[in-house]
């Protein structure tokens, strides 16, 4: 039997606005660092990069609010990855915003990621959104590739204090893809 995805949470308009505000601050802070994306698009190519992007349930709900369509259930590529670029920059999750393949920024983006991830956890609490931390693509596609990849679902108690938690990323620049 096909694994079933956990039901997607829904966000109130207030919760959605609060999350959009968090993302706006993340983006400002990242920009102020002067980090540059080389737009190689490799970071989002999960088929070849062999990493998994994680996102919280509130973030997945934020994306889903604009994309009620069904995505093909199989495959590890993000459905928003089009010709190497991101087709959903406005709603892309924190992990997509805080990764740069330039190692010069690793520590700083790790710190930024950790801080905002905790803020999103608090936001979920404040708006009564059940917290889950799960593979983003699998959550969009229906859960099958999470199991196929053998990845572990991370819960709040397991929040890892570095930016790689967003996807166990090892080579990419998906924040600006
Ligand atoms: S930046 Fe994130 S949402 Fe956009 S294509 Fe890449 S993985 Fe998907």
Image (tube, grey):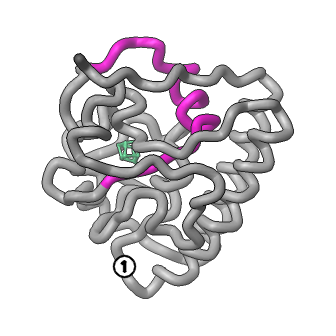
Is 99 placed left or right of 161 in the picture? left
Residue 144 lies, in percent from the top left, at: 27, 30
- Residue position for label 1: 102
How crowded pointer 1 is (Cα within 10 Å; few <14, some 14-19, many 20+) is rated as some
Q: Nearer the viewer, residue 85 or 10?
A: 10
- Secondary element under disc 1, as helix, strand or loop, is loop
Q: Nearer the viewer, residue 140 or 105?
A: 140
Which residue is most to the left? 48
Q: Looking at the picture, does residue 171 appear above or below residue 22? A: below
Q: Looking at the picture, does residue 41 appear above or below residue 85? A: below
Instruction: Identify the residue shown where x is 35% and y is 14%.
Output: 70
Q: What is the magenta range?
A: 52-71
Which residue is most to the bottom? 104
Q: Looking at the picture, does residue 173 appear above or below residue 83? A: below
Instruction: Identify the residue shown where x is 30% and y is 70%.
Output: 170
- In the picture, residue 169 is in which quadrant? bottom left
Q: Quarter of the picture for ligand 1?
A: top left
Which residue is most to the right? 126
Is 58 placed left or right of 109 in the picture? right
Residue 43 lies, in percent from the top left, at: 29, 58
Q: Nearer the viewer, residue 11 or 37?
A: 11
Is 33 placed left or right of 4 in the picture? right
């Amino acid at each position: 039997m096909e694994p079933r995805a956990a039901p997607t949470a829904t966000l109130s308009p207030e919760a959605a606005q609060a999350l959009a505000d968090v993302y706006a601050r993340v983006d400002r802070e990242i920009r102020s660092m002067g980090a540059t994306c080389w737009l190689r698009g490799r970071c989002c190519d999960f088929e070849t990069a062999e990493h998994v992007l994680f996102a919280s349930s509130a973030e997945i709900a934020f994306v889903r609010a604009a994309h009620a369509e069904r995505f093909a259930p199989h495959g590890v590529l993000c459905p928003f990855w089009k010709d190497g670029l991101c087709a959903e920059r406005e709603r892309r999750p924190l992990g997509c915003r805080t990764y740069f393949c330039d190692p010069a920024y690793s520590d700083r983006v790790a710190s930024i990621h950790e801080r905002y991830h905790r803020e999103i956890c608090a936001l979920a609490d404040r708006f009564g959104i059940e917290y889950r931390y799960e593979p983003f693509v699998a959550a969009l596609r229906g859960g099958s590739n999470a199991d196929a990849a053998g990845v572990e679902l991370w819960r709040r108690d397991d929040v890892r204090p570095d930016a790689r938690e967003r996807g166990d990323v090892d080579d990419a620049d998906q924040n600006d893809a």
